[in-house]
Image (tube, rainbow, N blue to C red):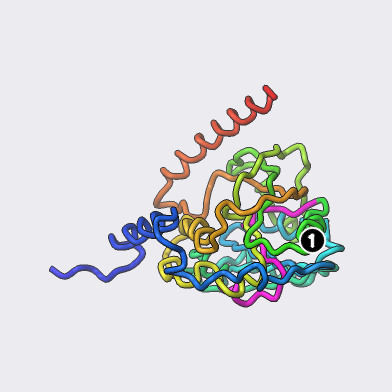
């Protein structure tokens, strides 16, 4: 009996993923798998009005993306020039319509940049991030998710914090997050014309949390590093098309390849994130993961709230 063709559904991929997870723990030298990271003398120490590119992905999350794009319009940068890059799929009609709408919304200091990908490639977030990293002209590139908001002068403060710096990877040390929202939460029920208006969420919906390392939506990379190394550029496993949104193990591999450790923390106000119960990778055929995940996060929120009360 012959083996089935290899694909993201077959037995070989879990083994390959395990290999890369072990490798990214530092067991193997990153230099075996990635071009060398430009040294400090090869990284421009830019000052003045910095060019910052933000890279986001959206699949059936237009109800989050509208908050992200609105945050740029409601708190436009004045001390930075921002390119907002969103990777999306033509099949996602609501996201496509939202991006078409925002194409006509002029925001001083912001350039909209919509990048279309086939669904199978969109589901591998490293594909779009790598494409953006190699093509960016920015001084710094922020890899984030579409549920992250940039409010209250966040990007101006980021430009201030990055003046003359040449760090490989930085991250904000604090964010404000919502509790874990259910799919029927009123904040997520944008319908009709409200999807095409600037929307915001009051501060009372958020609680402050400490960030101790660069992770998925909080990875800000020097532009010269991004152009040289891409995003897991040589790890073909993380660039294979797949049939559903994949858990983003490549984020850890990215930090390993850059030799960045946890990254360098910076004090940055204005970072907000909408936490939500249902993830894009949990489709109708796999409801159990979402059902288990939700109460665990709610328990985590309760514990964190209790600890804050004791301070």
According to the picture, the residue beneath numbered tag 1 turns out to be 159
Which secondary structure, mark 1? helix
In this view, the residue farthest toward the top is: 310
Whole-percent x, y for residue 209 in the image = 66, 39
Front one among 31 and 50 = 31
> Residue 179's spot in the image, x, y percent?
63, 38
**For residue 300, above or below residue 80:** above
Corner quadrant of residue 230: bottom right
Q: Nearer the viewer, residue 64 or 143?
A: 143
Q: Which residues are magenta?
A: 130-151
Disc 1 crowd, CA 10 A, few/some/many (<14, 14-19, 20+): many
Q: Is residue 234 above or below residue 291?
A: below
Question: Quick check: 97 left or right of 105?
Answer: left
Q: What residue appears at the point 56 percent right and 33 percent down from the top-left corner? A: 300
Q: Residue at x 59, y 68 (%)?
A: 88
Q: Position of residue 152 (x, y in %)?
A: 82, 51
Where is the C terminus found, in terms of image quarters? top right
Q: Residue at x 85, y 63 (%)?
A: 79
Q: Is residue 100 left or right of residue 24?
A: right
* Residue 62 visible, this orientation: no
Q: Tell me the quarter of the picture where residue 63 sits.
A: bottom right
């Amino acid at each position: 009996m012959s083996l089935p063709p290899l694909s993201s559904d077959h037995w070989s991929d879990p083994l390959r993923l395990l290999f890369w997870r072990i490798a990214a723990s530092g067991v193997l030298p990153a230099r075996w798998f990635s071009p060398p990271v430009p040294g400090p003398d090869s990284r421009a120490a830019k000052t003045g009005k910095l060019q910052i590119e933000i890279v986001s992905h959206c699949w059936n999350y237009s109800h989050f993306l509208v908050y992200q794009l609105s945050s740029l319009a409601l708190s436009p940068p004045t001390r930075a020039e921002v390119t907002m890059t969103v990777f999306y799929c033509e099949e996602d009609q609501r996201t496509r319509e939202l991006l078409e709408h925002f194409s006509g919304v002029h925001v001083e200091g912001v350039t909209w940049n919509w990048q279309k990908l086939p669904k199978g490639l969109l589901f591998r977030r490293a594909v779009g991030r790598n494409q953006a990293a190699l093509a960016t002209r920015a001084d710094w590139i922020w890899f984030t998710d579409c549920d992250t908001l940039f409010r209250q002068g966040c990007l101006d403060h980021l430009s201030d914090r990055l003046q003359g710096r040449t760090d490989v990877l930085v991250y904000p040390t604090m964010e404000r997050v919502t509790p874990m929202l259910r799919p029927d939460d009123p904040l997520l029920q944008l319908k009709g014309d409200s999807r095409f208006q600037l929307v915001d969420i009051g501060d009372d919906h958020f609680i402050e949390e400490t960030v101790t390392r660069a992770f998925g939506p909080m990875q800000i990379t020097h532009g010269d590093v991004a152009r040289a190394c891409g995003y897991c550029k040589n790890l073909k496993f993380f660039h294979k098309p797949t049939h559903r949104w994949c858990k983003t193990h490549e984020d850890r591999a990215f930090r390993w390849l850059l030799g960045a450790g946890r990254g360098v923390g910076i004090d940055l106000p204005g970072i907000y994130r909408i936490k939500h119960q249902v993830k894009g990778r949990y489709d109708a055929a796999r409801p159990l993961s979402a059902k288990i995940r939700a109460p665990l996060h709610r328990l985590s929120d309760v514990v964190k709230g209790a600890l804050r009360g004791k301070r």
